[in-house]
Amino acid sequence: MSAAPEHIAGSTTHVRHGGIGNVFTYGVDYVLIDPEARTGPALFSRNRFNLTAVHDRNHGGKRDHGIGAPWARQVFAQHGLSGDYDLRLLTQPSFVGYIFNPVSFWIAQRDGDLIAVIAEVNNTFGDRHSYVCHKPDFAPITPADQVDAHKVFHVSPFQKIAGTYTFNFKITPDSVAIRINHKNGSDGVLATLTGTRRPLSNRGILGALMRRPFGAMRTVALIYFQALKLKFKGAHYTTRPTPPSEEVT
């Protein structure tokens, strides 16, 4: 069933584990869309230029060469998901054509229950890797459930490619809450995304751009700002390794 796009005006918090601590919380604006629909307010578009937009080429498949929803459905099928389900994409939209998403989420729901998620992760070096999250037999994922995945992808140059991600998801009709905890011994990072679901509107888009100007440009600037803070604190910098050969784990 097609659904109107929604606006999640929320916040993200990152807490660094280990000897060199770092904590920050920023406001963020995500959209939750039906990736197989093309509806939306005047200031938001699908697959064409606008003040804000979501383009299939930026999601689902190789970076900048994505195909959108067909890719997500294919990945879910390859992992054993069959039958009917509702597919949604939780992502930050582009701002006047510029886009960068540290992580987007392909969400599969059946009868209102969350049954699977693809966490689509991008780094600032031009690479992408996706992690598929589900329980055995695609049983409903509740807020109390933890889904684990081995870290195989270079994200922060201040964290090793080692350890485990633990994902927690709480997707309700009113809100979104996602928790990703990377643990590598005493090191790692805890990241959260929380926000309230509201219909996406022109007024909401303009309000978001007034509160947090420049959209994804601001996201990249804040990433580099936090990297500089860690560098000055003495965190060890690791150069970009060769990305994993597989695009999905």
Image (tube, helix red, strand yellow):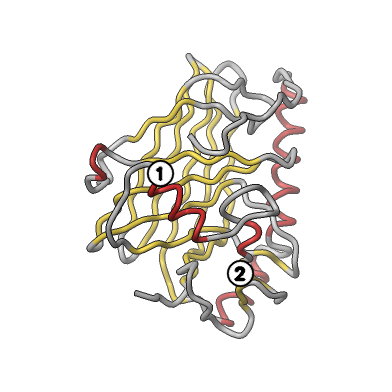
Q: Which mark is residue 78?
A: 1
**Residue at figure coordinates x 75%, y 48% from the top left:** 221
Q: Quadrant of residue 230?
A: top right
**Residue at figure coordinates x 28%, y 39% from the top left:** 135
Relative side of 40 to 156, left or right? left
Give, as a three-letter code, the residue at label 1: Gln
Question: x%, y% of residue 172?
Answer: 30, 60
Under circle 2, the secondary element is helix
Nearer the observer: mark 2 or 1; the answer is: 1
Residue 191 sits above or below residue 245 on the image: below
Give, as a three-letter code, the residue at label 2: Ala
Question: x%, y% of residue 116?
Answer: 35, 48
Q: Quadrant of residue 212?
A: bottom right
Q: Which mark is residue 172?
A: none
Relative side of 6 to 214, left or right? left
**Residue at figure coordinates x 41%, y 47% from the top left:** 178
Q: Quadrant of residue 50?
A: bottom right
**Residue at figure coordinates x 77%, y 33% from the top left:** 228
Q: Which sits in the foreground, 150 or 193? A: 150
